[in-house]
Amino acid sequence: MPELEILPLTPDRLEDFLAFFERGIPETEWGHRCYCAAFCAKDNTDERGMEKAEVRREAAVRYVREGCLTGYLAYEDGEAVGWCSAGDRNACRPCFGVRWIIGGELPETEEKAVSVFCFEVRPEWRGRHVSTALLERVEADARASGCAFLEAYPLKDGGNALENYSGHRSFYEKRGFEPFGETDKRLIMRKPLT
């Protein structure tokens, strides 16, 4: 595994976050840059125009500054090479991304938990275990904060490369996650931490 520094996204790392999406990750064939704005601990059900990259960017800047868009950046030599969107599961339940991308409501729970929503890795770093390093940091911090479990949402049918930003089922199974439930499109997988 490469020597990486994994750091939480904070307002003082906003420029690194934006540079990662704007210079490190190529646009998809339809000019898509997500900025992970759909997954944040904010009831963003009223966001308009989230299908447009510039709207997502503006929302992401606002959410990072407000501390409600959370996750981790992987750095190598001071440059962000990977990203994992992860946040308080219960706070994220009303998020736009949960309803639209995950495809349904998550079951309620009183237990403290962290949802792992997605990974993005710069093309030249793919296949070098950056996602594994990011997930290990998410798990370590979740354990330290007393979370009962981690939760992730891989596609049920495997999907294509573009749709697999949330990680494959096998990626999570290798790391101790087990199926817990499902939505229309995705599995709900959990890893107990206590």
Image (spheres, helix red, strand yellow):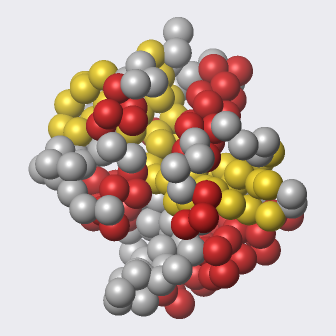
Whether residue 25 sits left or right of residue 97 in the image: it is right
Determine whether, in the image, residue 153 is placed left or right of residue 8: left
Q: Is residue 156 above or below residue 190?
A: below
Q: Is 186 placed above or below 149 here?
A: below
Q: Position of residue 180 (x, y in %)?
A: 25, 25
Quarter location, residue 152:
top left
Residue drawn at point x = 40 percent, y = 57 percent: 165
In the image, residue 147 lies at what x, y percent? Answer: 57, 22
Total count of labels: 0
Residue for point 47% across, 40% down: 115
Q: Is residue 164 visible in this depiction of the protein?
A: yes
Q: Is residue 93 above or below residue 122?
A: above
- Residue at the extreme top: 194
Please tell me which residue is depicted at 18% across the width and 38% down the height of the picture: 182
Q: Which quadrant is the N terminus positioned in? A: top right
- In the image, residue 107 above or below residue 155: above
* Coordinates of residue 83 in the picture (x, y in percent): 61, 56
> Residue 190: x, y in percent?
37, 26
Q: Is residue 47 left or right of residue 129?
A: left
- Residue 65 visible: no
The residue drawn where x is 40% and y is 25% is: 174
